Image (cartoon, rainbow, N blue to C red):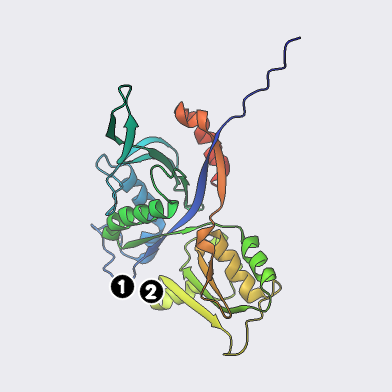
């Protein structure tokens, strides 16, 4: 009797999700090439400006720490797909028992949804190319921010994470949290800032602040009382979890900090689609995920 043949499980690649925001620098002269006379006009065009940067033939991501190459390989509507490789070395063993070192160029895919109501980036995880996606996030930020500064805009990128991770941490350490630090970006996406009880937008309009650091610290011999039914804290956590910033927590009697930026949201894509460069199908999947 023949044995049943079990189907092979498809292998998947993991992507981490980040949110970017484009904030107008109101202290700089706005009249850019005669096109924009007010911050409001510039804000309305911010995603078109980013689009023009991404599709330029000479646009490349660059890193001050690695030798990388990048290429826009597919574009559909507001979706932009880049391949980014890093020059690495690989040690090989030959048939005649000799050894050699060759150049190797492992690569990743970076997907950008430039819809003004979304503004998300997905970064493929590949430790052969880049040890962490935080490295990729940093050079994406550096590369785009340096270009978009010419238009009086600043580019910020923060991970999207599951807010329940934070609340699980709070439940695990109910009488140990000494300090909470919120690093928040001035919002330009109303759909992620609706729960905020502190008016970051008003602070930005009044002062041109781009990042707000809010630090909560208990008395010397006490701890913070953090509750999920607190509208103040919950609003900040919801905004931060949606990519509006990050949260650091320090426990009493410990130097160790909890950092929400270390646990971005993830999703998986079948490897075969990536290797086959099946961009139409990939585009459908990414559009369903990066919303």
* Location of the N terminus (image quadrant): top right
Q: Marks 1 and 2: CB-CB under 8 Å?
A: yes
Q: What residue is pinned by disc 1?
A: 27
Rendering coords of residue 74 (x, y %): 40, 34
Residue furthest to the front: 97
Rendering coords of residue 177 (x, y %): 61, 77
Q: Residues within 10 Å of mark 1 (few under 14, many from 20)?
A: few
Q: Quadrant of residue 165?
A: bottom right
Q: Quadrant of residue 196?
A: bottom right
The one of 219 and 202 positioned closer to us in this rendering: 219
Q: Quadrant of residue 228?
A: bottom right
Task: Give the residue drawn at x 47%, y 45%.
Answer: 125
Rendering coords of residue 173 (x, y %): 66, 73
The one of 120 and 260 positioned closer to us in this rendering: 260
Q: Secondary structure at mark 1?
A: loop
Q: Earlier in the sequence, mark 1 or mark 2?
A: 1
Q: How many marks?
A: 2
Q: What residue is pinned by disc 2?
A: 208
The one of 169 and 140 positioned closer to us in this rendering: 169
Rendered position, 224 above or below 36:
below
Rendering coords of residue 249 (x, y %): 55, 73
As drawn, the label of residue 59 is none
Q: Is residue 249 left or right of residue 22?
A: right
Task: Give the residue drawn at x 45%, y 41%.
Answer: 79
Rendered position, 245 above or below 94:
below
Q: Secondary structure at mark 2?
A: loop
Residue furthest to the right: 1
């Amino acid at each position: 009797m023949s044995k049943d043949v079990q189907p092979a499980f498809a292998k998947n690649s993991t992507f981490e999700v980040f949110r970017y925001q484009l904030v107008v620098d109101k202290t700089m002269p706005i009249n850019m090439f005669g096109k924009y006379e007010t911050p409001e006009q510039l804000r309305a065009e911010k995603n078109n400006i980013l689009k023009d940067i991404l599709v330029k033939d000479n646009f490349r991501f660059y890193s001050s720490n690695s030798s990388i190459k990048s290429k826009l390989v597919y574009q559909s509507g507001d979706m932009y797909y880049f391949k980014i490789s890093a020059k690495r070395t690989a040690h090989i063993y030959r048939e005649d028992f000799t050894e050699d070192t060759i150049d190797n160029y492992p690569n990743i895919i970076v997907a950008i949804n430039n819809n003004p109501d979304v503004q998300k980036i997905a970064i493929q995880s590949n430790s052969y190319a880049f040890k962490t996606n935080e490295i990729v996030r940093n050079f994406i930020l550096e590369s785009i921010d340096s270009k978009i500064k010419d238009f009086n805009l600043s580019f910020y990128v923060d991970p999207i994470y599951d807010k329940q991770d934070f609340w699980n941490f709070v439940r695990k350490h109910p009488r140990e949290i000494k300090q909470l630090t919120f690093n928040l970006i001035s919002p330009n996406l109303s759909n992620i800032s609706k729960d905020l009880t502190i008016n970051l937008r008003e602070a930005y309009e009044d002062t041109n602040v781009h990042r707000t650091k809010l630090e909560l610290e208990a008395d010397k011999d006490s701890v913070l009382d953090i509750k999920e039914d607190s509208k103040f804290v919950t609003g900040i956590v919801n905004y931060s979890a949606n990519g509006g910033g990050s949260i650091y927590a320090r426990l009493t009697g410990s130097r160790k900090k909890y950092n929400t930026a270390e646990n971005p949201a993830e999703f998986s894509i079948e490897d075969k689609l990536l290797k086959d460069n099946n961009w139409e199908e990939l585009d459908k999947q990414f559009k369903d995920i990066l919303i």
